[in-house]
Image (cartoon, rainbow, N blue to C red):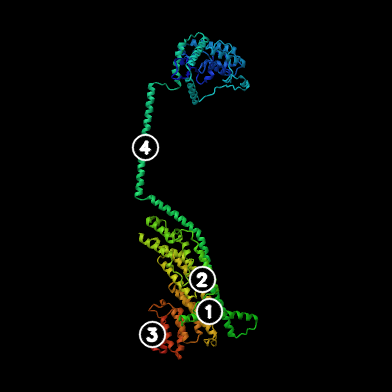
């Protein structure tokens, strides 16, 4: 038995009648159904465009029912090429109308003889097709269409005895309007079958099923008649095969069940097995989902528990919020200070320039007055005649300066008389009275201070008030001390406070008597409170916050104070020197609480310009002229008065220098005060003076300026080497006075020698001049 190819049958709807099973067309797999649908009058037509038109005719004749027979087979496939080669029709698929091959059951029982006879009949059929190939014109096609319409109206069958069958490639279904058909050269002749996807086939099958469900019973009856006619035609052509139509109908019924060959076989066991498999998969999926759900529930519970534990125990959320707020606050503070520091520097520079200008005015005036007065006295000593206009002009200018100097001195004398100070010496007062320049100075200073107040007008107190800023960091230190100290906040605070402290110091003048002290300033008290709270809260004995104040002083206050020392301070002014010493002593005392390299460097940065400025004052401002004895004999002479004023001015500087004895090293002060000023200027002036009570008084003032700390050693019998000249002058003066009538001053000189620890010299002098009544003075020491 020959192996038959598989057939694919289109399924009918479940609600179709029994006659539907006989009407179901079948075709070779993969072949389009509309190309295999042929009527009885089309058996000899080629598979061109006319086949499509011929396939439409039975459908129009019998309504919307399906009147097609799918009868392609391997024989038809082999016959098609031969048919194409024997005709001029374009290549298409030849149709084999034999229904023998459609019956799978009957075909399976055929013998090899049947196969050979079938091959012979196919050969004869091919010759018949070749002789019948003819392409009709449009009029013939229209006549065939009208004939079918007439047969439909008479409810008659369409005769299969048609000698001229035809197919026209590309003919449209709507043939009622042949004049609108395209020309033959415009027809697209398909040479290969267009493959269809599974989705397209399913959509086509669904559309056909829906179309079939709408058929009426009458259409189904006509469909059955059509299929029976097709079957008779197939039996007539295939000779030697007598096939019962009823048996063919049963075969088709079987084929209906075989239509699912392309799908898995369907029965209760398979369905049950598939359902069980599906159920098992769903159960497994459900169990996996349950496990995931339980896991998620546990994760949710664990997360809630963790959140609750964190909220109740460590308050991590609050901690994070605090750190975030601190970061935002510090960023904003830095941005604010970066913008304001420019204005602070401008105001600070303007104020500093104004004070420097004022100091330079006083210094230049003093030097100019000293130069003109000295020149005037020299002219008087020479008794030179003023003969030229130029000399006269200079004399007039000098005369005006001298009158201005004398007027200021007169005002100062009157002020001292009113105050009851009668012991004042000429030359020891500060010549810094107000003048017309001072009015301009005060006006400029007022304008600067007005601009100073406007710098932080638009800033919140949290960003410009030092106490509020330190309170923020104090909260951090109290809540999270570990992170506070690990962040080295004690090193950052001085840098943050630097612009604000400089802002408060713009109006601060450490040289003025009424200037506020550093300890009374708001920033100083705020930092002290912050440090004190750190001492209480910190568990560490060596808390780094202790160094905040010292660092602020070293980085901010000392540079500010150094500028005053270098450019504004007048060492000849006792009031300025006293105020400066007070501020410097406080600064250095604060440094002594915490010694380190930075603070030591800051201390040196302050003391070095002080020493330098005093050296400059000794070189530039000390001038004690030496006049002939005849010029200074009269104490009311201008030469004597000028010499006295200059001596007391130098003695005033000597006293101001020695006021630094607790701040500057002793060797530095001895070099400046004793070596340069006393031995170089004051002793020379004393040697040129007439011995007497005035000289002893001056020596007493010099000894009174010497720090007592230098002579506290009880074993000390010889004074400092720098005082040797002064001691010799005292002994010389004592010898002169002892031979004269003025002997009371000798005791004063012995007391000066005892005070400065020149005990050996004093004893020798007493023994030399037999002053036994003065030995008790030495014993008391």
Q: Nearer the viewer, residue 437 or 261?
A: 437
Question: Would you name the residue on which mark 2 appears?
Answer: 568
User: Could you tell which of marks 1 and 4 lies nearer the N-terminus?
Assistant: 4
* Vertical arrangement, residue 497 with respect to residue 688, above or below: above
User: Could you tell which of marks 4 and 3 lies nearer the N-terminus?
Assistant: 4
User: Could you tell which of marks 3 and 2 lies nearer the N-terminus?
Assistant: 2
Identify the residue at image location x=53%, y=63%: 346
Q: CA distance from mark 2 to mark 4?
A: 83 Å
User: Could you tell which of marks 2 and 4 lies nearer the N-terminus?
Assistant: 4
Disc 4 vs disc 3: which is toward the camera? 4
Residue 408: which numbered mark, if any? Answer: 1
Disc 2 vs disc 1: which is toward the camera? 1
User: Could you tell which of marks 3 and 1 lies nearer the N-terminus?
Assistant: 1
Residue 777: which numbered mark, if any? Answer: 3
Residue 685: image location, x then y, percent? 51, 82
Mark 3 element type: helix
Disc 3 vs disc 1: which is toward the camera? 1
Residue 694 visible somewhere in the drawing: yes
* Vertical arrangement, residue 61 with respect to residue 326, above or below: above
Residue 678 visible somewhere in the drawing: no
Residue 293: which numbered mark, if any? Answer: 4
Within 10 Å of disc 3 (Cα), the crowding (few <14, some 14-19, many 20+) is some
Disc 1 vs disc 4: which is toward the camera? 1
């Amino acid at each position: 038995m020959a192996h038959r190819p598989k057939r694919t049958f289109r399924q009918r709807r479940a609600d179709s009648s029994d006659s539907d099973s006989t009407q179901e067309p079948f075709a070779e797999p993969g072949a389009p159904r509309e190309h295999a649908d042929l009527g009885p009058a089309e058996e000899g037509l080629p598979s061109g465009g006319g086949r499509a038109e011929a396939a439409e005719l039975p459908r129009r004749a019998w309504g919307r029912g399906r009147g097609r027979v799918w009868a392609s087979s391997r024989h038809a496939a082999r016959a098609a090429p031969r048919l194409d080669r024997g005709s001029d029709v374009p290549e298409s698929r030849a149709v084999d109308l034999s229904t023998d091959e459609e019956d799978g059951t009957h075909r399976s029982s055929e013998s090899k003889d049947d196969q050979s006879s079938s091959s012979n009949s196919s050969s004869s059929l091919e010759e018949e097709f070749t002789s019948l190939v003819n392409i009709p014109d449009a009029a013939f096609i229209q006549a065939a269409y009208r004939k079918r319409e007439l047969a439909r109206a008479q409810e008659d069958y369409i005769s299969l005895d048609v000698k001229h069958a035809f197919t026209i490639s590309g003919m449209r279904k709507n043939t009622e309007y042949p004049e609108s058909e395209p020309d033959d050269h415009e027809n697209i002749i398909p040479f290969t079958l267009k493959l269809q996807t599974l989705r397209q086939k399913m959509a086509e099958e669904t559309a056909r099923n829906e179309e079939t469900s709408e058929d009426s019973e009458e259409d189904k009856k006509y469909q059955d008649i059509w299929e029976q006619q097709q079957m008779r035609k197939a039996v007539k052509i295939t000779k030697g095969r007598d096939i019962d139509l009823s048996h063919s109908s049963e075969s088709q019924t079987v084929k209906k069940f075989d239509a699912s060959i392309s799908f898995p076989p369907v029965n209760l066991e398979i369905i049950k097995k598939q359902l069980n498999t599906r159920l098992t998969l769903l159960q497994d999926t459900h169990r996996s989902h349950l496990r995931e759900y339980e896991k998620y529930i546990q994760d949710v519970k664990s997360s809630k528990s963790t959140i609750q534990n964190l909220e109740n125990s460590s308050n991590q959320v609050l901690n994070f919020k605090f750190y975030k707020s601190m970061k935002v606050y510090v960023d904003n503070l830095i941005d604010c200070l970066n913008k304001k520091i420019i204005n602070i520097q401008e105001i600070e520079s303007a104020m500093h320039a104004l004070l420097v200008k004022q100091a330079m005015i006083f210094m230049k005036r003093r030097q100019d007055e000293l130069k003109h007065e000295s020149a005037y006295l020299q002219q008087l000593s020479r008794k030179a005649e003023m003969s030229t206009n130029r000399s006269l002009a200079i004399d007039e200018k000098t005369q005006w300066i001298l009158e201005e100097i004398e007027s200021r001195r007169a005002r100062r004398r009157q002020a001292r008389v009113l105050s009851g100070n009668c012991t004042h010496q000429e030359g020891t007062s500060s010549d810094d009275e107000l003048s017309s320049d001072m009015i301009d100075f005060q006006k400029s200073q007022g304008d600067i201070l007005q601009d100073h107040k406007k710098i932080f007008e638009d800033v919140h107190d949290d960003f410009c008030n030092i106490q509020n800023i330190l309170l923020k960091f104090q909260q951090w230190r109290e809540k999270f001390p570990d992170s506070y100290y690990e962040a080295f906040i004690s090193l950052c605070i001085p840098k943050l406070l630097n612009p604000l402290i400089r802002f408060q110091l713009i109006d601060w003048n450490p040289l003025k008597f009424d200037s506020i002290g550093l300890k009374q300033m708001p920033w100083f008290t705020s930092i002290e409170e912050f440090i004190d709270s750190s001492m209480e809260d910190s568990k560490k004995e060596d808390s780094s916050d202790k160094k905040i104040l010292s660092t602020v002083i070293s980085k901010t206050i000392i540079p500010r104070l150094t500028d005053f020392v270098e450019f504004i301070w007048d060492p000849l002014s006792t009031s300025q020197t006293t105020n400066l010493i007070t501020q410097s002593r406080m600064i250095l005392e604060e440094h002594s609480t915490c010694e380190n390299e930075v603070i030591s460097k800051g201390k040196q940065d302050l003391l070095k310009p002080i020493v330098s400025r005093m050296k400059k004052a000794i070189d530039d401002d000390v001038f004690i002229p030496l006049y002939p004895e005849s010029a200074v004999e009269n104490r009311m002479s201008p030469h004597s008065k000028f010499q006295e004023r200059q001596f007391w001015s130098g003695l005033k500087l000597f006293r101001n220098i020695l006021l630094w004895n607790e701040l500057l090293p002793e060797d530095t002060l001895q070099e400046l005060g004793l070596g340069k000023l006393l031995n170089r200027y004051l002793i020379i002036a004393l040697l040129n003076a007439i011995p007497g009570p005035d000289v002893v008084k001056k020596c007493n003032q010099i000894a009174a300026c010497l720090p007592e700390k230098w002579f506290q050693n009880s074993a000390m019998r010889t004074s400092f080497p720098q005082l040797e000249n002064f001691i010799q002058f005292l002994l010389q003066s004592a010898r002169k006075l002892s031979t004269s009538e003025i002997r009371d001053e000798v005791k004063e000189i012995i007391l000066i020698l005892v005070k400065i620890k020149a005990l050996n010299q004093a004893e020798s002098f007493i023994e030399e001049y037999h002053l036994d009544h003065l030995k008790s003075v030495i014993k008391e020491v």
